[in-house]
Amino acid sequence: MDAVLLDTDVFSFLMKSHDTRGVVYRPHVKDKTVAVSFITVGELYYGAEKKGWSAKSRKNLDERLKAVVIVPYDEELCRTFGRVRASLPAGVAAFLKASGINPSCGRGSEGARSS
């Protein structure tokens, strides 16, 4: 079984049929098992929260995510991450980054305080 792990941008490009940026990636995912990381799921829910997606758009996202393999953590954690990150004022996110904490998901690139 051939599989491909997509990052957030590529998944988003492919999710939108009208987005021409997805054209270049379609041949790479054809007939393959598509996977995304739990961080990508969190970033997608963050984007939905931040942009105030409609219930229909959120349902579409949920359906698209059901069609791929999510490299674990936990979907509820990702939803919570999206809601919390969307609620952070830009100044708080900048402060966290300056403190060595990655506001994208906890701390640092591995989820721990950067040293």
Image (cartoon, rainbow, N blue to C red):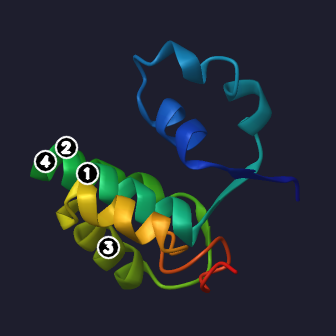
100 relative to 65 in the view: left or right: right
Residue nearest the viewer, comparing 105 with 53? 105
Q: Quadrant of residue 73?
A: bottom right
62 relative to 69 in the view: left or right: left
Helix, strand or loop at label 2? It is helix
| Circle 3 residue | 79
Does the CB distance between marks 2 and 1 fall below 8 Å?
yes
Residue nearest the viewer, comparing 38 with 111? 111
64 relative to 110 in the view: left or right: left
Q: Could you tell me the amino acid type at mark 3? A: Arg
Numbered tag placed on residue 51 in the rendering: 2
State the separation of the CA atoms marked 3 and 4. 14 Å
Does the CB distance between marks 3 and 1 fall below 8 Å?
no
Q: Position of residue 69 (x, y in %)?
A: 62, 66
State the separation of the CA atoms marked 4 and 1. 6 Å
Does the CB distance between marks 2 and 4 fall below 8 Å?
yes
Numbered tag placed on residue 30 in the rendering: none
Q: Quadrant of residue 115?
A: bottom right
Q: Position of residue 103 (x, y in %)?
A: 43, 68
Numbered tag placed on residue 48 in the rendering: 1
State the separation of the CA atoms marked 2 and 4. 4 Å
Q: What residue sits 25% from the left and 54% below the top?
A: 90
Helix, strand or loop at label 1? It is helix
Helix, strand or loop at label 4? It is loop
Q: Position of residue 87 (x, y in %)?
A: 18, 65
For label 2, the crowd category at 10 Å Cα-Cα, with few meaning under 14, some 14 to 19 and many 20 or more, is: few
Numbered tag placed on residue 52 in the rendering: 4
